[in-house]
Amino acid sequence: MAEAYICLGSNLGNKRATIARALQMLTETPGVTLAARSADYRTPPWGKLDQDWFVNACARIDTTLAPDALLALCLAVERQLGRERRERWGPRVIDIDLLTYDDRTMTTECLTLPHPRLTSRAFVLAPLAEIAPQLTIGDRSVTDWLADADATGIERMAP
């Protein structure tokens, strides 16, 4: 059984419900178990700033799927929920990123682990720190990475 962390984000439609549905769909797959889930966080847009705010959350998944199979599952759930990839960093009904998979480091045509921009994105680090504060990325903990990130505008949402 491997331990993987994912980040989910949405800024179209019922954002929180879409994230909850995506997690449900992921864990309906044999070999995928939800082990921990952060609260939802309201976050400002990143990359492309002229769009609505996001809801982001992170989850720990225990899985028997290989990293590429877990990524394929995440992409399939995105498609089933109506994700259309039109512009980089643009609005999206759902985005699911595979952040880490055990302590594996790998780069393929489709997947880089750990996620290459994980340590610079406060909208990922804030919810991830809630469920895995001591998770090590590179040579630092998630909490340490978050302390150096610009978390302006990021707010933990009430349940």
Image (cartoon, grey):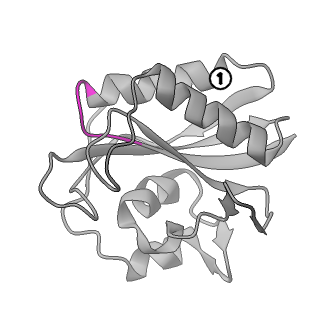
Position of 43 with respect to 141 (left or right) is left
What amino acid is at disc 1? Thr
Q: Position of residue 136 (x, y in %)?
A: 67, 71
Q: Position of residue 11 (x, y in %)?
A: 25, 39
Q: Position of residue 32 (x, y in %)?
A: 74, 28
Residue at figure coordinates x 67%, y 36% from the top left: 72
- Which of the two residues, 76 or 5, is positioned nearer the viewer here? 76
In reply to whether residue 13 is colored magenta, the answer given is yes
The image quadrant where one finds the C terminus is: top left
The image quadrant where one finds the N terminus is: top right
Q: Residue 66: which quarter of the image?
A: top right
Residue 77 visible, this angle: yes
Residue 61 visible, this angle: no
Residue at figure coordinates x 18%, y 62% from the top left: 153
Q: Position of residue 74 (x, y in %)?
A: 59, 35
What is the span of residues highlighted in magenta in the rendered image?
Answer: 9-14
Tell me the SS state at disc 1.
Answer: helix
Residue at figure coordinates x 54%, y 26% from the top left: 77
Residue at figure coordinates x 11%, y 56% from the top left: 50
Position of 106 with respect to 56 (left or right) is right
